[in-house]
Image (cartoon, rainbow, N blue to C red):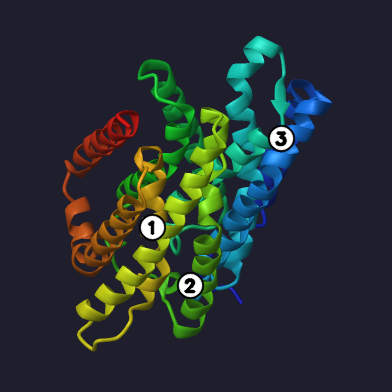
């Protein structure tokens, strides 16, 4: 039974869902078409469908189970993730095809466009993770649509004015999603909201179950990082190197996160939060610079550094974040840090 202070979504969520879905259907009727070239479709199917399945599992099961760690959300977190992803992927297909619509007259759907849309959806789910426990499905849907709009616009600006390769703009989804969630938390901050809400509580059962999300993400992350490499570089060897580098970085980050989790614990025990999040740090770090990685030890070093920074940061820096975000100039600092870090990663990647 819902708590007494919870407002009913009966007159909010269904109208929003029907309005958005009807609008998307109308857009698809008049402006979206399926790729008609049979040879191209078969080639795309052979090259992308297996990776598309992996990315799809990451988005639905990985992020879905990862969102079940809250007591009040529990398994509803997986349902919210499915709802948001199903709506967001349609919006991403439309936005990513707007530019091509001027040249072809219609938005063409193929396996590649679906994979890109899934990755844009993953960026929105990363941002949503920053406000879980203080939002309802209506908020989550609006946040996802807004984040995807910003992410696609950001990618277009990078490709148009900075001449950044398409692959590099996609792999920056981690950075954009994280900082979008951070800024969203700052904008939505109200006096007294730092007190723990009932829906933010965590217990052992939901926390352990959410580790399944981490397992799904860890297993399929090599496909996530390598699925678009062959498209931009037309070199299967680069795609395979991305798989190898991602797997090595993930393996090292898992071991490193476990080791430093025990070292930083007063009781000398593994921290479940570190296992859930920091073991994935290597996959994120290698994803935004993998085209610059050519040697195995470099990937392993990146995984080690990412897990170290992530573990120590969550142990010692996280408790100070709320105090920092309360200051009036926090938005400006974070905004410029975002673009400086983004351009720094791009520069390293381009100077391969």
Reading the chain from its start, which is encountered first: label 2 or label 3? 3
Q: Is residue 343 above or below residue 305?
A: above
Q: Which mark is residue 249?
A: 1
Residue 181 visible to the viewer: no
Categorize mark 3 by other alpha carbons within 10 Å: few (<14), some (14-19), many (20+): some
Q: Which mark is residue 275?
A: none
Where on the picture, by quarter, is residue 79? bottom right
Camera-side residue of 151 and 11: 151
Residue 93 location in percent, x, y?
64, 33
Kindly report the distance in space between the C-alpha atoms of the residues bearing marks 1 and 3. Answer: 28 Å
Reading the chain from its start, which is encountered first: label 1 or label 3? 3
* SS assignment at label 2: loop
* SS assignment at label 3: helix
Categorize mark 1 by other alpha carbons within 10 Å: few (<14), some (14-19), many (20+): many
Reading the chain from its start, which is encountered first: label 1 or label 2? 2
Looking at the rendered image, the quarter that the C terminus falls into is top left
Question: In the displayed structure, does residue 41 sit left or right of residue 275?
Answer: right
Camera-side residue of 346 and 290: 290
Residue 214 location in percent, x, y?
49, 67
Q: Identify the residue position indicated by label 2 in the image.
A: 69
Q: Residue at x 67, y 38 (%)?
A: 20
Q: Residue at x 43, y 32 (%)?
A: 169
Where on the picture, by quarter, is residue 192? bottom left
Categorize mark 2 by other alpha carbons within 10 Å: few (<14), some (14-19), many (20+): many
Q: Which mark is residue 44?
A: 3
């Amino acid at each position: 039974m819902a708590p007494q202070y919870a407002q009913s979504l009966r007159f909010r969520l269904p109208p929003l869902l029907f309005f958005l879905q009807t609008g998307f259907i109308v857009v698809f009727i008049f402006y979206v078409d399926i790729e008609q070239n049979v040879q191209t479709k078969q080639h795309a199917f052979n090259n992308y469908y297996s990776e598309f399945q992996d990315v799809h599992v990451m988005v639905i099961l990985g992020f879905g189970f990862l969102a079940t760690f809250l007591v009040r959300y529990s398994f509803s977190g997986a349902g919210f993730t499915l709802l948001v992803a199903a709506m967001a992927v349609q919006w991403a297909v439309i936005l990513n095809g707007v530019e091509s619509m001027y040249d072809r007259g219609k938005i063409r759907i193929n396996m590649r466009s679906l994979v890109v849309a899934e990755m844009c959806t993953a960026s929105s789910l990363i941002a949503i993770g920053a406000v879980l426990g203080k939002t309802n499905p209506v908020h989550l849907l609006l946040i996802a649509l807004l984040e995807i709009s910003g992410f696609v616009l950001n990618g277009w600006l990078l490709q148009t004015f900075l001449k950044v390769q398409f692959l590099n703009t996609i792999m920056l989804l981690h950075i954009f999603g994280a900082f979008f969630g951070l800024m969203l938390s700052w904008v939505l901050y109200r006096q007294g909201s730092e007190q723990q809400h009932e829906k933010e509580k965590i217990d052992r059962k939901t926390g352990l179950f959410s580790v399944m999300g981490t397992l799904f993400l860890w297993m399929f992350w090599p496909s996530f990082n390598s699925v678009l490499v062959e498209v931009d570089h037309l070199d299967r060897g680069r795609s395979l190197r991305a798989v190898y580098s991602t797997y090595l970085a993930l393996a090292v980050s898992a071991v490193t996160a476990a080791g430093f989790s025990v070292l930083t614990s007063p009781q000398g025990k593994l921290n479940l939060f570190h296992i859930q999040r920091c073991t994935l740090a290597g996959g994120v770090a290698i994803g935004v610079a993998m085209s610059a990685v050519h040697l195995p030890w470099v990937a392993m070093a990146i995984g080690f550094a990412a897990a170290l920074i992530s573990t120590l940061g969550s142990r010692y820096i996280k408790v100070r974040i709320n105090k920092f975000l309360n200051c009036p100039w926090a938005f400006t600092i974070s905004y410029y840090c975002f673009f400086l870090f983004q351009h720094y990663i791009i520069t390293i990647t381009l100077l391969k």
